Image: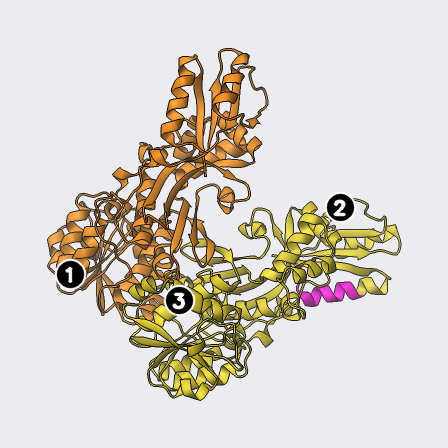
Chain colours: A orange, B yellow
Amino acid sequence: MKKIAVLGCGTVGSGVVEVFYKNRASIERKAGCELDIKYIYVRRPHPEIAYQDKLCFNFDTIANDPEINIVVEVMGGVDPAYRFVKTCLENGKSVATANKELIAKNGAELLSIAKQHHVNILFEASVGGGIPIIRPLHQCLGANEIDDIQGILNGTTNFILTKMIREGMSFSDALALAQQLGYAEADPTSDVEGIDACRKICILASLAYGRHVYPEYVHCEGITKLTAEDVEYAKDWGGVIKLIAKASRDPQTQKISMLVAPMFVPFESQLSSVDDVFNGILVDGDATGEVLFYGKGAGKLPTASAVMSDVIDCAKAADTIDTLYWEDSDNNFVEDWRTQPMQSYLRLQLQYRQQTALINELFDTPVLLARKSQPETEIAFITPPLTPLQLDELLSRLSDEGISVLGSVFLA
Amino acid sequence: MKKIAVLGCGTVGSGVVEVFYKNRASIERKAGCELDIKYIYVRRPHPEIAYQDKLCFNFDTIANDPEINIVVEVMGGVDPAYRFVKTCLENGKSVATANKELIAKNGAELLSIAKQHHVNILFEASVGGGIPIIRPLHQCLGANEIDDIQGILNGTTNFILTKMIREGMSFSDALALAQQLGYAEADPTSDVEGIDACRKICILASLAYGRHVYPEYVHCEGITKLTAEDVEYAKDWGGVIKLIAKASRDPQTQKISMLVAPMFVPFESQLSSVDDVFNGILVDGDATGEVLFYGKGAGKLPTASAVMSDVIDCAKAADTIDTLYWEDSDNNFVEDWRTQPMQSYLRLQLQYRQQTALINELFDTPVLLARKSQPETEIAFITPPLTPLQLDELLSRLSDEGISVLGSVFLA
């Protein structure tokens, strides 16, 4: 019999307890041993929780109980989660966590501590909720070199963009609806500014490329500046706007390029039809070609089931799982995103219609995009490949002429 | 150093050798040991193969070489693959195979032999080519009860249907094109009659439900009778025709329902946009909800990379992997498909326009579908849920009145 402690009993935590007791027989068969939840750690009384006898208010009880083999961390946030997880690993307990913030910030250190103590820290639920992605990436695609990962990794922003695309809603109306439906939090910053997606792509890149990619080294743009007009131009171009988190590796230099930003995605891409709160992750391996993983990226039961699959693996593993590992890094292997050429969509406000001549000169006579009720002095087009440094320079020249930027989105 | 023998050096076999030597360093890192290919078994000389010193024409040399730890079986077919694989397992060698026919026919027996000898038989490549599906199904989704699996599992038929849908091609023209492009074999029977898809869904169902589902107990229809008109009616209904392989379990009786047949798939389903030679597998778990796995279902390198991921697992595993297992069965747990109610699309040739009254009576005034240049005496509609037995009875009543069936497709 192996004993489990669950740290935190919010949405995901209560889901973990529910899934465990519902599918216990099959989980034990897969784990190859008997399992039970001994403690549910909470900070204050929760009279609504069914398993009152398991509630525990003192973390040290769990940390020092030699009967506890596996700890499920579903508190979220870095403090006290980091401290608790570290202590558990040091005390020889394996950890299954859904905490993307923790892994994106302290993954390399925690993986190393786990290795020293011959236990595991697993985090399938930290990216893509119930979609299996961490394990397939390090295991099933083990014989591949991963050239490129592109993901829609945040369900909240994807819901907002879907509403803007399908129903022509404004960003703020779509956000209000998402909040009303419980898809967005009262403070939506970490979703709409791309921070959540950024943490997740950092975890995937660290795993795929073997060195820790820290979120603070990744350029990250949110979706708050997008308008219904940008959505219309995307359609005219032949696609949709999605918040894309990207990681790729240059086969020559081994340097990694990372970017989180709204992007034009062509209709031909499978990512273009990943709608509503769903997530999709497109992994391009040198042997497999493109493989898409798609499903619910969040939610109580999907996330809980991913955590439970990690619990099963923790129960089975006799030692640290070698392939799920990456080194710490100083991140000088991540390319400066401002030196990477990319195409962009631009929407500009001209002073005079005649200024199109200047646009043609600066942007190599780009193909124009059109929308309904387009004002005479609004112009939209796709740029040639330009580095952000080059683009900034051109935009400042336009600004000198009184031409302002109404919208700007990269091409995926 | 662990030594590998590759049985067969056709498309997939040569891909395995290529992927191994290309990504050897990273494969060895993931396997946690040094690896090399010692033999490539072929029946006759292959002067075009780069590794002539590794060629071996005598299987017994491999079977009796104690240095060989892992055998890759990529010959296809059941004879002599079954005999070879069995011998290897009995001699304590793990096997990685891409052979869906072998696993669908002899999987339970081979899994049991592997267990007795503390080795593994792994078959990630047998379903979905390079798409990770076998491992996620038994591992990542381990905490789920699988309610339902629906897959587009055959790239050849999906290519043909895509051409019929997008370009209005006839079945025979689309098949001819597929043959010309190398997507279909000279004898396309096992693809177009659904036999290949049936083997694959049997493997997935055996794994998900823990008991061997033999292909001969599964009702299987191909796509040869579909016409461009059926495709037009599907569009009017709001979807496309796909060759769907299904497996589901009744939570009460634990009985399994299986079916392989062309089906109407609504545009809202992610499977409707799985086009060309791609495969898509939608797995519905009680906790995760729907998860889609999508990618290239065949091809040299995708399949080879799946085989190599199995080789890595064979190299790492100290004993038989418990969760990848199912029992043999007498298949009386598979429901008789003729007693399962389903909705269908029907296209009928009336004798007289007035016979619509009879249709309305028999089919509960169904909603009619329409197409361009529809003849006066052609009628198409969606039936209420009927078992195939009930449907047959109604169709024979129509036949008595001189009404014949022009097309018939189930709804997914």
**Is residue B338 depicted above or below A224 in this figure?**
below
* Dot 3 alpha-carbon crowd within 10 angstroms: few under 14, some 14 to 19, many 20 or more: many
Identified by mark 2, the residue type is Ala
Residue A355 shows up from this direction:
yes
Displayed quadrant of residue B161? bottom right
**At 54% across and 60% down in the image, what residue appears?**
B151
| Foreground: disc 1 or disc 3 | 3
Where residue A339 sits: x, y (%)?
Answer: 35, 35
Does the magenta run of residues contain B114? no
Dot 3: chain letter: B
Displayed quadrant of residue A158? top left
| Foreground: disc 1 or disc 2 | 1
Dot 2: chain letter: B
* Dot 1 alpha-carbon crowd within 10 angstroms: few under 14, some 14 to 19, many 20 or more: some
Identified by mark 3, the residue type is Phe
**Is residue B21 depicted above or below A214 in this figure?**
below
Where residue B365 sits: x, y (%)?
Answer: 74, 50
For label 3, the residue is: B20
The residue tagged with tag 3: helix, strand or loop? Answer: helix
Q: Which residues are magenta?
A: B386-396
First in sequence, mark 3 or 2: give its number: 3
Identified by mark 1, the residue type is Gln
